[in-house]
Image (tube, rainbow, N blue to C red):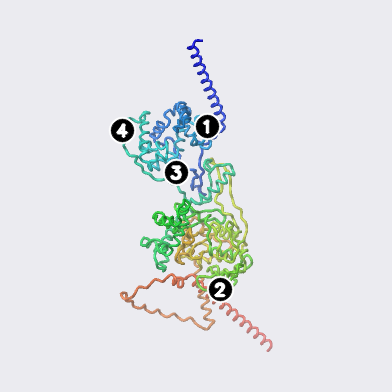
Amino acid sequence: MDPTLSKRVRIIAGAKGLAALGALGLALLCAYAVILIPFTPSISDIRKAKIDQPSVLVSADGKRLATFKPMNREWVRLNQVSPHVIDALIATEDHRFYQHFGVDLRRTATGLLRTLIGDREGGSTLTQQLARNLYPEEIGRKRTITRKIKETIAAIKIEYAYTKKEILETYLNTMPFLYNAFGIEMAARTYFDKRAQQLSVIESATLIAMLKGTSYYNPVLNPERALARRNVVLSQMVKRGVLNQADFDRLKTRPIGLNFERQPEPVGPAPHLAAHIRKWLIDWADRNDKNIYSDGLIVHTTIDSRLQAVANQAVHVQMEALQAVADVEWGVSSERLISSSPSTYVDQRRRVQPFAYFWKTKPGLLDVFIRESTTYRSAVDSGAAPEAALAQLKSNKEFMVKLRADKTRLQAGFVAIDPVTGQVKAWVGSSDFNTDQFDHVAQARRQPGSTFKPFVYGAALEQGMSPDKRFIDRAVEIPLPDGTVWRPSDLSPPTGQSMTAREGLIYSKNTITAQVMQEVGPKKTAELARRMGVDQSKLDEVPSLALGTSPVTPLEMVSAYSTIASGGEYRQPIFITRITDKNGNLLARFATENQRVMSDKTVGNLINMLRDAVDQGTGQAVRARFGVRADVAGKTGTTQKNTDGWFILMHPRLVAGAWVGFNDSRVMMRSTYWGGGGHNAVLLVGDFFEHILDARLIDSGARFPYARPRDSILEPYWDAAKDWLFDTVRDWLSGERAKPAPLPLPPPRRDVEREAPRAEPTERERERLEDTQERQGQRRLERQREKERLMERLRQKREQWEQEQLERDGYLRER
């Protein structure tokens, strides 16, 4: 055979073999691609992705409260994006975008070859990148042939389902740009503080440059790399004919010109409630095959946007004032009470270093706080010696400033419920959501103090005890099963005098409440509290439960008081009335059922007693400071060492309660005055009721149906007139006439220059001399006893007169 012919045959045979091998490989690749098709997103899934909509939370009056988004993104239409952005994107990432069908065969072949040789440079089109970003789990992120094939199949499906404009719009709205900024709109706001429609050529090029590697080309942390990559983008725009050379030469030397600011997710009017509902809604959606981030659910809440706005304002204003009180009281060494007005402390705060005296006198506590911090634990876990980590953090000024601020920031929880329906109308979970996202309404459990006492008296009334039953105000000692003795006490020592149960609750006497608890028992008290709404927290069935020693949430307490205001019917608090889809079709409806837990008689007596607690007892600030004249009843609460302050106020149409304190119970208000619920938490509730009554957001004329009717706002004057009448009758029976009061002596002449300034009373003197409410209570008790003695003398005189009449009649008949 001719050697030349033989060589030609071998070449042809080899070529045929290679062709056959290539065909076989292509066939296998196609077969593999067909196998992978079911493992890529379906056309229906792709169409669904286009119309994904976040769920929206709305108030009862139709105002938007929150939007549940998986990421911080604002979707914009393509015509709301600067044309420079689109030009830069197509020129740099996919200049044949309008010519291909989702896959650029030339770039794909190049990409496959580079993938085989281990080169990380890819050849994906914009559509393929979009497929990878929309379906990371289905397609995968690992650089393999399988991922490339899946990406290609998904891109073809996307091109089938969407137009080119829709693909561009979706791409620009889904790309990440660091700092929790997703999409071109949030990127424009984050890096340049403007809308996407306003981006210039170099700003557009800077953002598109980040797509190659957001961290590597981050203009904030790596400005030189970002500038170089931006110029590459500009040069590509010149190459593709969307930017002329003269403009490129002029722009390439310009700085990036950042105006960087993180874009926080918008906080609605009720952020803590929104977070609470989000957790609940995720569970509901899972059970009902829904997605709260894509199905466009409309969640209709019970919140009244007007009441919520007033609650937000009341908490903000009053907590600012109370924070000033805490800052100033702990900022000076003196123990004296500076003022009973918060505004005085607001004026003085700038002249003192907040909490300086607190940290000076508690250096050991500061070390404990440092050791409890996550930063300290992380340092120790990483191998640092405990003492070295402690010393390092103490020398870290930024860390210490933040730690002190967090520990000494006064917090609050406020919630309002409609007792007729059980619907939550306002919810404020902290003094400021931006600094503390912890919810002090539904999450925080704190000792309720004296606000728990109505459950003790309610249980006793249910068992038949009369509110007028008498107890002696004496020292109480209750032996406990562990051998210890519980000795409850009040601010002032026992008087040894007789008091009714009603007066014990009105003036919040611990010694009287403890005796009532002895009669009714902790078990009965706890059972009633649970039936009334305190059903999520553990209640220790011990005698001290009477004084509120078991931690509970404000939501539970306000719910339980709503049971009283509703006439003894418990309604589980609800915050959602219905859920609809984006077209208004009803998906679910929610309501609460009522359950009778107290008799009408008990409710009437309890409301009367708690009304007097506001009129005469520890809650007087509601009327005296805020001028609330509606028919209301309520109770204050204070725990040991001024750790927690509570106040809950009931109105026939709304029940609102507040807790005030620090997140860490080892930090507390300094003075007994400002540490009491009757002086701190009452400010929030009083401010709230004052404004909603003035604005007529609730019916100011509504009255409790199960309590004695109030004659008018002149009732106190009528009481004074009755007191005068009793005094006059008493003097007449005793044979004495009221003597005219002597004329007042002229005031002594003051020598202003020589007169020394009076020293302000110390805190101890203040507690002893300014216990106004308790002194008033004692005077009222003495006056009441005087009335009772007077009535007894009148009864005796009447019996004596009747006896004389009988004797006289008998004598006449006998004669």
The quadrant of the image that shows the C terminus is bottom right
Amino acid under disc 4: Asp
N-terminal-most mark, 4 or 1: 1
Neighbor class of circle 3 (other Cα within 10 Å; few <14, some 14-19, many 20+) is: some
N-terminal-most mark, 1 or 3: 1
Residue 539 position, x and y percent, is: 59, 61
Quadrant assignment, res 793: bottom right
Quadrant assignment, res 83: top left
Quadrant assignment, res 213: top left
Neighbor class of circle 1 (other Cα within 10 Å; few <14, some 14-19, many 20+) is: some
Looking at the rendered image, the disc whose residue lies closer to the viewer, 1 or 3, is: 1
Residue that carries the numbered disc 3 in the rendered image: 180
The residue shown at (44%, 36%) is 172
Residue that carries the numbered disc 1 in the rendered image: 146
SS for callout 4: helix
Residue farthest to the top, as pictured = 1
Amino acid under disc 3: Asn
Disc sitting over residue 409 in the figure: none
N-terminal-most mark, 1 or 2: 1
The residue shown at (42%, 68%) is 335
Residues under labels 1 and 3: Cα distance?
A: 30 Å
Residues under labels 2 and 4: Cα distance?
A: 92 Å
N-terminal-most mark, 2 or 4: 4
Amino acid under disc 2: Ala
Residue 543 position, x and y percent, is: 59, 66
Reply above or below: 250 against 492: above
Residue 690 appears in the rendering: no
Residues under labels 2 and 3: Cα distance?
A: 61 Å
Residue that carries the numbered disc 2 in the rendered image: 475
Residues under labels 4 and 1: Cα distance?
A: 43 Å
SS for callout 1: helix
